[in-house]
Image (cartoon, grey):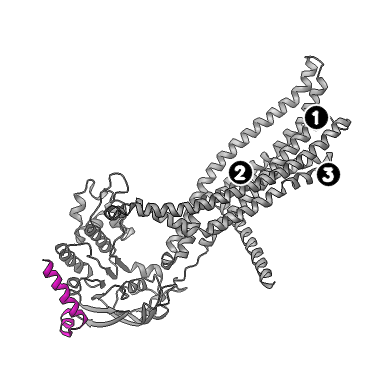
């Protein structure tokens, strides 16, 4: 019993929470375009009043026609008819004018709303913790937020406006019906109540289905990406994987399609029975009014007015119910948007950040650092210690899974350690502004991001403050060894890179890495981190790249994570990692003399290299 009470309380709390989303959405829509929203509301109010005026004039017109019937075509008879006809025509023209103006305002409003909501999602996406992107739950949330967020907000805008307009019309229709019987407006509302309850329940079922199938729908998108994305096209063809992924897509699509069609079938049947109930109510009311006509207590004009008012009233109530249920449905889905926007970052700047050192004087130090990824029980690092002297090139080598890449993520504060700390010149990373810390670090990842922009823009991304400084961009390109390649492109530095857009030119893996190095040269960060920076280069290109890198790294603190001992041997200090621990350290000669893990791996790598040659 207590469990049921708790469930009811929880459901009630969720409903109130969803109502708050409705008010938040209206506030969001008003913020996106306040002036247009005000004009739109005035137009809706006027459109809500005019249908009742038209219905009311129907009685006058019908009674006038009855009065002049059989009287012949005369000036007097025409005068009696022409006035209500002209008034009704004027109302019709005015309604069309207001409708067209409202649609124009609504179209302009939708543009502002879509841009505003996209801006909110983009701002949250680039500011939320890095860890979120490694979480399936977060990706579900992001998908739900992005899935028609703008469209659902616009739908809510439309239905809220229609609700206002229809409510005004319904009130005026109710006022018209009251003189014929105070119970008529009650019958009008009661006839549509079953449909309201049916649609409300179905919308909740559909929302729950959508929430439950988010991961499956993301998997569908993944399968489609695998089959259509250029980076995967080679393996799909080489290993003949097309049919495998097509069948996986169709199996999952068939499952979702069957579930969706079952929901639609249930929705159709329930709506039919609700419509039949409404039909019985309206039929009973019309029989009652017909009896009054036969008894002579009302005129044909009264009957025409009643028929129009009751019929339109029913249609308006259906529209109001549809508005309310659509608003409810959209508020459920828009709740996903607000849930996403309310996610809070855990890795944040301190209230009073300390200034970051202009130049490292001492060292970067990992002090008793323990860390495990969210949702994982296994520690990647446990009581880990590491010292990186200022102004030196330090190489970190080790097998896959040793924890090398985790060091990058911690140093960039993508994550914070569970225990222990990381310091720059004895100041904890968490005491610095996130923006200043990351500005002081340049990372060349193993697979640089291919930005499908011009070559000039690609390099300028290293330091956006220099994007108009052509000389600095060219100097960075020359320093990285990519300048000659760029000037040989069809439009030189203005050539679009990649094949996504017209006239684009793709680069090799090694050339993309050189472009990333150019960004690093442009940024001139205090700390440089390289994650397998020459993995896509041949030995000759690697040697040239290393010489250029030493020029970049002069007097700066550099961390090189690599499997290539030909790269590691050029470092001032080498650390060997295994199982989240430092097991050996020293320079190349010292480690060879130690004859441990590094020496063993060096001999194997050199032996393989000689064998391959």
The residue labelled by disc 2 is 40
Task: Give percent across and percent down for residue 306.
Answer: 78, 35
Q: CA distance from mark 2 to mark 1?
A: 35 Å
Q: Which mark is residue 182?
A: 3
- Predominant secondary structure in magenta? helix
- Is 306 situated left or right of 547 in this image? right
Residue in the foreground of this view, choosing between 403 and 546: 403
Observer able to see residue 120: no
Q: Which segment is the magenta one?
A: 588-613
Tell me the crowding category of disc 3: few under 14, some 14 to 19, or many 20 or more residues within 10 angstroms, Cα based. few
Task: Give percent across and percent down for residue 521.
Answer: 25, 63
For residue 462, above or below residue 387 = above
The residue labelled by disc 1 is 301
Between discs 3 and 1, the one toward the N terminus: 3
Q: Quadrant of the C terminus?
A: bottom left
Q: CA distance from mark 2 to mark 3?
A: 33 Å
Q: Name which residue lies at 51% across and 61% down.
A: 340
For residue 207, above or below residue 570 = above
Q: Quadrant of residue 600?
A: bottom left
Task: Give percent across and percent down for residue 232.
Answer: 31, 55
């Amino acid at each position: 019993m207590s469990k049921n009470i708790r469930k009811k309380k929880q459901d009630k709390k969720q409903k109130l929470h969803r109502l708050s989303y409705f008010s938040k959405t209206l506030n969001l829509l008003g913020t996106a375009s306040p002036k247009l929203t005000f004009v739109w509301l005035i137009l809706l109010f006027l459109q809500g009043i005019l249908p009742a005026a038209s219905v009311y004039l129907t009685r006058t017109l019908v009674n006038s026609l009855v009065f002049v019937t059989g009287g012949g075509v005369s000036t007097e008879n025409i005068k009696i008819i022409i006035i209500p006809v002209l008034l009704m025509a004027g109302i019709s023209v005015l309604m069309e004018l207001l409708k067209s103006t409202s649609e124009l305002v609504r179209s302009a409003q939708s543009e502002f709303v879509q841009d505003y909501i996209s801006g909110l999602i983009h701002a949250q996406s680039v500011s939320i913790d890095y860890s979120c992107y490694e979480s399936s739950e977060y990706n579900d949330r992001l998908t739900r937020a992005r899935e028609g967020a703008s469209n659902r907000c616009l739908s809510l805008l439309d239905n809220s406006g229609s609700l206002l307009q229809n409510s005004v019309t319904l009130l005026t229709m109710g006022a018209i019906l009251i003189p014929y019987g105070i119970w008529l407006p009650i019958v009008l509302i009661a006839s549509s109540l079953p449909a309201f309850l049916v649609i409300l329940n179905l919308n909740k079922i559909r929302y729950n289905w959508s929430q439950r199938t988010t991961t499956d729908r993301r998997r569908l998108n993944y399968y489609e990406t695998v089959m259509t994305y250029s980076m995967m096209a080679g393996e799909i063809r080489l290993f003949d994987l097309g049919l495998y992924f097509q069948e996986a897509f169709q199996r999952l699509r068939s499952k979702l399609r069957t579930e969706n069609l079952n929901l639609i079938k249930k929705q159709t049947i329930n709506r039919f029975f609700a419509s039949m109930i409404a039909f019985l109510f309206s039929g009973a009311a019309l029989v009652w009014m017909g009896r009054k006509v036969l008894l002579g207590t009302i005129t044909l004009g009264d009957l025409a007015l009643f028929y129009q008012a009751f019929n339109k009233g029913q249609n308006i109530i259906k529209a109001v119910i549809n508005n309310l249920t659509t608003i409810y449905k959209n508020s459920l889905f828009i709740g996903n948007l607000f849930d996403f926007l309310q996610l809070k970052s855990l890795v944040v700047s301190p209230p009073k950040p300390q200034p970051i050192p202009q130049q490292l004087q001492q060292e970067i130090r990992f002090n008793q650092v323990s860390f495990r990824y969210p949702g994982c029980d296994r520690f990647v690092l446990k009581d880990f210690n590491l010292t990186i002297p200022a102004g030196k090139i330090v190489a970190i080598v080790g097998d896959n899974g040793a924890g090398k890449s985790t060091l990058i993520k911690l140093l960039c504060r993508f994550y914070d350690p569970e225990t222990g700390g990381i310091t720059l010149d004895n100041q904890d990373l968490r005491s610095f502004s996130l923006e200043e810390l990351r500005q002081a670090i340049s990372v060349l990842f193993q697979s640089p991001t291919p930005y499908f922009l011009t070559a000039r823009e690609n390099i300028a991304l290293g330091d956006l403050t220099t994007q108009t400084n052509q000389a600095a961009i060219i100097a960075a390109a020359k320093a990285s060894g990519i300048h000659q390649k760029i000037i040989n492109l069809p439009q030189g530095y203005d050539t679009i890179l990649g094949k996504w857009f017209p006239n684009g030119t793709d680069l090799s893996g090694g050339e993309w890495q050189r472009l990333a190095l150019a960004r690093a040269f442009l940024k001139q960060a205090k700390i440089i981190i390289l994650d397998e920076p020459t993995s896509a280069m041949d030995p000759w290109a690697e040697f040239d790249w290393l010489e250029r890198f030493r020029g970049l790294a002069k007097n700066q603190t550099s961390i090189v994570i690599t499997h290539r001992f030909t790269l590691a041997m050029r470092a001032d200090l080498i650390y060997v990692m295994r199982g989240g621990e430092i097991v050996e350290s020293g320079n190349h000669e010292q480690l060879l003399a130690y004859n441990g893990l590094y020496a063993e791996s060096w001999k194997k790598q050199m032996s393989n290299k000689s064998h391959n040659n």
